[in-house]
Image: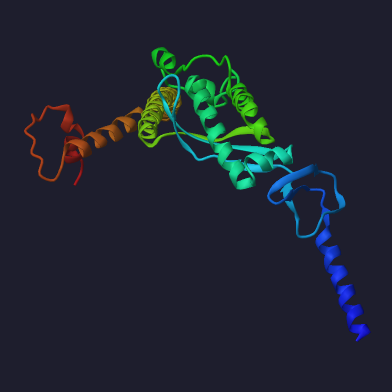
Amino acid sequence: MKIKILIGAIVFCLLALYSTAYIVEETEQVVITQFGEAIGEAKTEPGLYFKIPVIQIATFFPKNLLEWDGDPGQVPTLDKTFLWVDTFARWKIVDPLKFFRTVNNVTGALGRLDDIIDPAVRNFVTSFSLIETVRTTNREMDTFEVGLDKHKDEERNLGAVNTGREKIVEGILKQAQPKLDQFGIELVDVAIKRLNYVEQVQKSVFERMIAERKQIAEKFRSEGEGEARKIEGNTERDLKGITSEAYRTAQEVKGKADAESAFIYAQAYEQDPDFYYFLRSLEVYKASMKKDTSLILSTDSDFLKFFKEYDAGPK
């Protein structure tokens, strides 16, 4: 019986110790509440702590950075261009007691962040033009645009960046932070996650981009066709020059060959002129008299000289 009582006493002591002691991790901070009210100082350093069991309750809060993701929405810029803006932020609890007494928990804090950051984002986006919200500096764009005349280039110029996106984000942070001090929250960073045109504006922007690209393509195409005609003209000119030169060379070679051939024939025929005359006459007979050719000539004609001499010979 005494053993059972001893064991029961030990178990009771262990349970009492368990409900009395609590451990604070490096990423945690604790507020002790008694009957729903925060008492004492918040425990922000890691270690082993003690509280009155049952009466006091340890409420844990994260000590590291927490995430806030805003709801994307349509916001008009100063130059009346509607943008789809999606923002996010990083925050942390720096005063657990104030945090517990005002928003009580992380879910309540996220609601307060919605009420404070979203209006700040809207206020700054509507106070600046599109180029200020999108760009940070006046650095030249990396894209290569050609084919647009000066008038269109002026239309595409949205103006110079005087403030820039980074300054706008800093302004949002500075405007929202004082309103969060009362909740024990420090807003570490705010950033624009995504900017895009609304659907109606997107359609007109895409149509304009397509038209510009078609204009650029047409310019390249016409320049290419002009260059092709130029190359074809030069090629044809060179071809005619080469052909003319080749023909001239061929005629020179042919003329020299004909002259040499005539010289050789002349030397050969000079050895027997009568025989040469006879051969030339036979060639003329062959060229002028066909099977069905009829000739009416005088008997005194030189054309029939060799016929007459052949007929006058011995039989």
Identify the residue at the far bottom of this view: 1
| 151 and 275: which is toward the camera | 151
Identity of the residue drawn at 13% across and 46% down: 291
Q: Please tell me in which quadrant of the rendered image residue 227 appears.
A: top left
Q: Position of residue 239 (x, y in %)?
A: 42, 27
Q: Position of residue 248 (x, y in %)?
A: 42, 22
Q: In this image, 304 relative to 138: left or right?
A: left
Q: Is residue 113 visible in this depiction of the protein? A: yes
- 31, above or below 233, in the image: below
Identity of the residue drawn at 49% across and 39% down: 72
Q: Is residue 63 visible in this depiction of the protein? A: no
Identity of the residue drawn at 80% across and 43% down: 40
Q: In this image, 282 relative to 169: left or right?
A: left
Q: In this image, 224 relative to 66: left or right?
A: left
Q: Position of residue 155 (x, y in %)?
A: 41, 16
Count the marks: 0
In what quadrant of the picture does the N terminus appear? bottom right
Identity of the residue drawn at 76% across and 44% down: 39
Q: Position of residue 183 (x, y in %)?
A: 65, 35
| 184 and 76: which is toward the camera | 184
What's the coloring here?
rainbow
